Image (cartoon, rainbow, N blue to C red):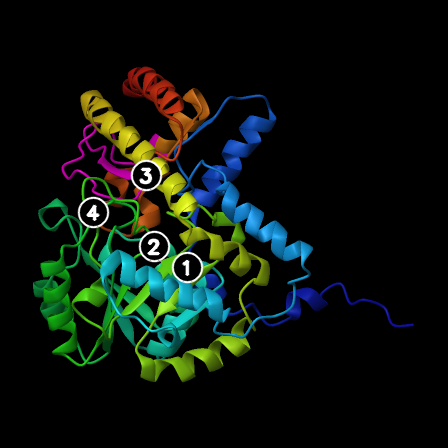
């Protein structure tokens, strides 16, 4: 019987370079520390993770339970359940007045699955997308997995933290394949107007590139409706999800809208990467578009707006600089430079001393990341009010 060579493991080849290049998603590390504190008895107020605090609406849960009871547990096709793609097609007609045929819609394992497909389709090794800095961190990590990259373009309040056509022109080069923007955006909550989307589309398509738009927070806008890029560019790629407006985070279900000529390649990728999306989640999602479900979701949207409308002036009153009022999502992106130049230490202070968790800017890019934090208002108004009381107290001890 052979014996283990003690030095064998150290002599093995290292793990892949891509795995070493992928940066940690620090908000998840923060959440893990918050969970440790809670297990030790602390009352932690969570403002770090972008997850609605509402549980999945009852009609959606009931539809999932009914599907289980009927034994609907086998694979669907890689493009997703035909009935769900047809429901989404009707949804685009009703909400946006758009004729998006079900054959252009791919159901995916979460919005991340949609990004996985788009990255695999559009990025060759050594090529890159342009993205605003700050932006959702996993987007650039997906590109790295595909041996491409993101070229982060610094964006500030003067452009609502969004990529502009002028920046597209200035940063485009022979290795650029397109641009990825988000509306409403994470971490800033800002929304691109129809005119801004059209101008970005013109700037990208004039250079032969692809425009990809993250519309995952559509539905969660306040005092306005976010236009879809498909209203101005039918050939754009749209990432979306059932996680945010529809409140199905743990069900892991999203979708991708793509030009018709891209669908065969996307289907081949889906077949090989994940076979098919969750069958139970897809049957549950069929209930998302029922009037009784939409009524629940709209009431929740109103609750999010009430939270934003209270929290924004409260944080400004404490000295946080939030120059742009977010129009969507459930985030406030705050400048803390009057308090600190080290957002990670700032966040650690409030988690450890006041048991309030929020996210340092380093998760979202490089541009002034030590001077920004993100607050998520996916918590009850009462908990947000308690959080502000604790933050006010914590600012006194932080200053000293």
Q: Which mark is residue 111?
A: 1
Disc 4 marks which residue? 190
- The residue positioned 57% from the left and 68% from the top of the image is 14
Task: Compare residues 196 and 151 and report the one nearer the observer.
Answer: 196
Residue position marked by numbered label 2 in the rendering: 216
Where residue 81 appears, x then y in whole percent? Answer: 51, 68
| Circle nearer the N terminus (2, 3) | 2
Decide if residue 123 is in sight here. Answer: no
Going from N to C along the chain, the mark reached first, 4 or 2, is: 4
Marks 1 and 2 close (CB-CB < 8 Å): yes
Disc 1 crowd rating (10 Å Cα; few below 14, some 14-19, many 20+) is many
Can you identify the residue that label 3 sits on? 301
Read off the magenta span: 320-346
Name the element at disc 2. loop
Crowding at dot 2, Cα within 10 Å, few <14 / some 14-19 / many 20+, comes out as many
Q: CA distance from mark 4 to mark 1?
A: 19 Å
Does residue 298 show up magenta in the picture? no
For the residue pair 338 and 10, the one nearer the viewer reads as: 338
- How far apart marks 3 and 4 lie (CA) works out to 16 Å
Dot 1 falls on a residue whose secondary structure is helix
- Above or below, comparing residue 47 to residue 272 in the picture: above
Give the foreground label among 2 and 3.
Answer: 3
User: Which residue, as the protein is rendered here, is positioned at the far right?
Assistant: 1
Residue 292, horizontal then vertical, whole percent: 42, 44
């Amino acid at each position: 019987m052979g014996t283990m060579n003690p030095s064998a493991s150290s002599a093995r080849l290292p793990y892949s370079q891509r795995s070493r290049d992928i940066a940690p998603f620090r908000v998840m590390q923060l959440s893990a520390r918050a969970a440790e504190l809670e297990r030790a008895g602390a009352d932690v107020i969570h403002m770090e993770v972008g997850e609605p605090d509402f549980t999945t609406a009852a009609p959606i849960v009931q539809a999932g339970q009914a599907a289980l009871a009927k034994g609907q547990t086998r694979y669907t096709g890689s493009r997703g359940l035909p009935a769900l793609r047809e429901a989404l097609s009707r949804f685009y007609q009703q909400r946006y007045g758009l004729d998006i045929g079900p054959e252009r819609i791919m159901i995916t394992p979460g919005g991340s699955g949609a990004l996985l497909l788009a990255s695999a389709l559009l990025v060759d090794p050594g090529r890159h997308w342009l993205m605003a800095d700050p932006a959702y961190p996993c987007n650039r990590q997906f590109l790295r997995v595909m041996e491409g990259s993101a070229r982060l373009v610094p964006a500030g309040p003067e452009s609502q933290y969004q990529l502009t056509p002028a920046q597209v022109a200035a940063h485009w080069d022979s290795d650029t394949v397109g641009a990825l923007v988000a509306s409403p955006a994470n971490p800033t909550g800002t929304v691109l107007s129809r005119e801004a989307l059209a101008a970005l589309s013109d700037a990208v398509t004039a250079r032969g590139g692809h425009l990809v738009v993250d519309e995952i927070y559509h539905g969660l806008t306040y005092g306005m409706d976010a236009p879809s890029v498909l209203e101005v560019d039918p050939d754009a790629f749209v990432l979306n999800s059932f996680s945010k407006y529809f409140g199905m985070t743990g069900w892991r279900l999203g979708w991708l809208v793509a030009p018709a000529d891209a669908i065969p390649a996307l289907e081949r990728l889906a077949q090989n990467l994940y076979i098919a999306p969750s069958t139970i989640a897809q049957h549950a999602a069929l209930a998302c578009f029922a009037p009784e479900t939409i009524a629940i979701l709209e009431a929740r949207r109103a609750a999010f707006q009430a939270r934003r409308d209270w929290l924004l002036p409260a944080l400004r009153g404490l000295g946080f600089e939030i120059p742009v009022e977010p129009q969507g999502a459930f985030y406030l992106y705050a400048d803390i430079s009057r308090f600190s130049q080290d957002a990670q230490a700032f966040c650690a202070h409030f988690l450890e001393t006041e048991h309030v968790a929020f996210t340092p800017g380093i998760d979202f890019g490089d541009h002034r990341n030590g001077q920004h934090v993100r607050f998520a208002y996916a918590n009850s108004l009462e908990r947000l009010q308690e959080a502000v009381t604790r933050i006010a107290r914590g600012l006194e001890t932080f200053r000293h």
